[in-house]
Amino acid sequence: MDSKMKPVINVSYSYNPLEETLEYEFKKKAVFIGIPKENSFQENRIALTPQAVAVIVNNGNRVAIEHHAGMASSFSDNDYSEAGAQIVYDKQEIFKADIILKTAPINHEELALLNEHQIIFSPIHIPSLTKEYLQKCIDKKIIGIALGNIKDDAGNYPIVRSMSQIAGVFAIQTASKYLSNNHEGKGILMGGIAGVPPANVVIIGAGMVGEYATRTALGCGAQVKVFDNSIYRLMRLQRTVGQTVFTSVLDPIQLTHALKEADVAIGALKPHKGIVPMVVTESMVEKMKPGSIIIDVSIDNGGCFETSSLTSHEDPTFVKHDVIHYCVPNIASGVSNTASTAISNILMPLILSCTETAGGANTLLHNKPGLLAATYLFKGKMTSKILSQKFGIKYTDLNLILSSNL
């Protein structure tokens, strides 16, 4: 080789290896999640299914479930154990968790077990709340997140929507059952057959419950009339069910006439300021046909029939003015497996986001506007303006708290 082409090596140079720069993923903090067994509010649901628990555990977290917590939803302790959950027999051990998941409001027994800065996902039942109860929750300095107020990225309330859809379908199924002779009904088939007219169904309320009740009743072949004071909701219902349905505003004369002919009346009005307007008077119920059915889905917030009175899943009906009344609150709990799966599908991604967020609860709520809107208590502060005004408790804006702590 020509000497001009040879490489020149100068011994004064030194050759040192360079460090390779690698992206390092910080280890996520394992979170302890506890699910107690519900024993109040006729509650049969559970917040997470075994499949959801498996996903959370496989992401490095710990889940403890109280013995037989999923039994009423047809999920056994063995199902959860195989998914990686720890089965616990002592409720106090469950309440040592960082995050508590409940499908019923916190009861007084559980209130004593809460710990400071715990994150509690649970419903709140405004009609049964008291100032003393809320003050005890505030003193515990928990972070309270109301399940029904959680919003998705589109600004909807996914858990409320899911439970409303279930309630609408279940109301028609229940009405069909109580129309039969086996349950002292009139012996009417909801959809009729050739030459025999179907049942007449009146639905009061065109929200999500009313829409799914309408869909189900039409699917059974019933004749349906829907009443609501919102023209927008009536138009949306007509559009979404895909066929022409009799609709009307809540005109008392028109409603009375429809109820006289009804075999089934479904109360599905939405609450206003926590209370459902009572639109069907006792005299209107007296004019209904003997053996007809009232399903008051709105009973959770007072009911929209004057004759409505709370019943239970164990004793669901009573008869007044020869009309069968079904006034069970928390109606979705009657199909707890379906309802639990729906709730779990919504909560599981949220719980994973809790475990993946560095910076604790402050950062999580700041980055999740849907959870921010649902937080009614935060470390000793009342952060719900509605509850603050109703019970006369000092209100603190959660955004200001988080901004000052970030």
Image: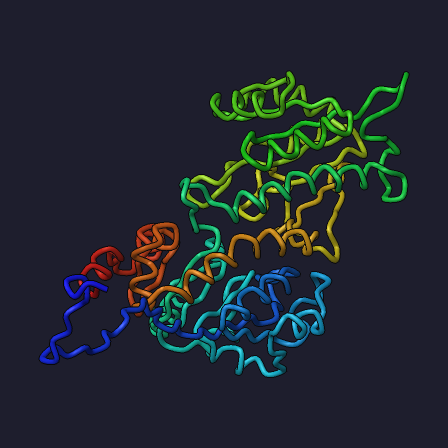
Q: Quadrant of the N terminus?
A: bottom left
Q: How many marks?
A: 0
- Residue at 62% x, 56% y: name it: 340
Q: Quadrant of residue 289?
A: top right
Instruction: Tell me if 196 is positioned left or right of 332 in this view.
Output: right
Residue 402 picture location, percent across and down: 24, 61
Q: Quadrant of residue 225?
A: top right
- Residue at 56% x, 53% y: name it: 345
Residue 292 picture location, percent across and down: 77, 33
Coloration of the structure image: rainbow
**Above-or-below relation of 4 to 92:** above
Q: Quadrant of residue 9?
A: bottom left
- Residue at 53% x, 66% y: name it: 56
**Above-or-below relation of 159 to 70:** above
Task: Examine the rendering and report whether any part of residue 10 can be seen.
Answer: yes
Q: Residue furthest left?
A: 12
Instruction: Tell me if 217 is positioned left or right of 5 in this view.
Output: right
Residue 342 picture location, percent across and down: 60, 51
Residue 185 picture location, percent across and down: 84, 38
Task: Examine the rendering and report whether any part of residue 42 can be seen.
Answer: no
**Above-or-below relation of 185 to 386:** above
